[in-house]
Amino acid sequence: MAPSFSSLACFTALLLSWACAEQPPTVLDKDATVFPEASAEAGSLSFDYRVGPGDVLRVTVFGHPELGSPLYRNSTPGTPVEASGKISMPLIGFIDVNGKTVFEIRDALVQAFSVYLKDPKVDVSVIQFGSQRFYVLGEVRQPGMFVLDRPLSLMQALSLSGGFTTSANREQVALVRGPIKEESVALVNFEDLDPAAALPVQSGDVIFVGRRRWAAVGEVARDLVPILQLIALPVGTARDIALFQDIRNN
């Protein structure tokens, strides 16, 4: 999906107004208990890949190779998911696959082919991942966009980016995820073996590592906004904003 510059502008404006509003700053309390559901998530990584534009599928219709994904030498291998979230299949036409797992797509194809075939057997797999992405920014060795093609924890995601630079503030790692809500701001402490480091990464997440220690919520926003402007982040995919902090074993 192409970056949405209008969405970025709106998001940045909201973030700036949130950071600069004339109200008492919310101090980041090290011992605050926030986002209680995160402690339950941290124990396990479940992952059902949701297909979207940018992915390429391999569809096999057993006994009918002409109805599956093209495998011929002069054809593009696989079946691409179009910008509309649909795939085009022989005989049955367009099928909406956006946001579905491969099992849900398989069931939809079986139903569609059943109009023409008796008891069709279909297999679906993703052969090229491209729709589910997350971002690691700031004081890491290899900042950028990464494809979320398997279950990843926050710690594993940071490892993919090469780990922290020598200037990184490891006590306050921000995970950004969707509508801006001051009450959902927290941080993850990587110096203190914070259990929140095991939180699962979701599509659209932004992991932000700062250089200095933040004392108030607005300071996080002021450091993050210039980076979002530089990369033209497609923020429509970044759902909630949550900077997970110090989820302890209480």
Image (tube, rainbow, N blue to C red):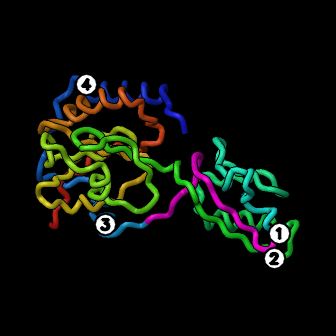
Compute the Cα span from label 3 to label 2: 42 Å
Q: Residue at x 69, y 63 (%)?
A: 59
Residue position marked by numbered label 2 in the rendering: 119
Q: Which mark is residue 40?
A: 3
Residue 114 appears in the rendering = yes
Q: Which residue is mark 4?
A: 21
- Please provide percent x and percent y for residue 132: 48, 50
Which residues are drawn in magenta?
47-64
Q: Do the numbered discs 4 and 1 sit on residues whose CB atoms are within 8 Å? A: no
Residue at mark 1 to residue at mark 3: CA–CA distance: 42 Å
Residue 114: mark? 1
- Determine if the magenta segment contains residue 58: yes
The foreground one among 153 and 37 is 153
Image quadrant containing the N terminus? top right
Q: Residues within 10 Å of mark 3 (few under 14, many from 20)?
A: few
Whether residue 157 is situated above or below residue 8 in the rendered picture:
below
Q: Would you identify the image quadrant in which residue 115 lies?
A: bottom right
In space, the residues marked 2 and 4 are separated at their CA atoms by: 62 Å
Q: Tell me, yes or no, whether the two marked residues, 2 and 1, touch with CB atoms within 8 Å.
A: yes
- Eye-nearest disc, 3 or 4: 3
Give coordinates of residue 161: x percent, y percent. Answer: 30, 48
Kind of residue indicated by mark 3: Ala
**Amino acid on which the number 1 mark rests in the picture:** Ser
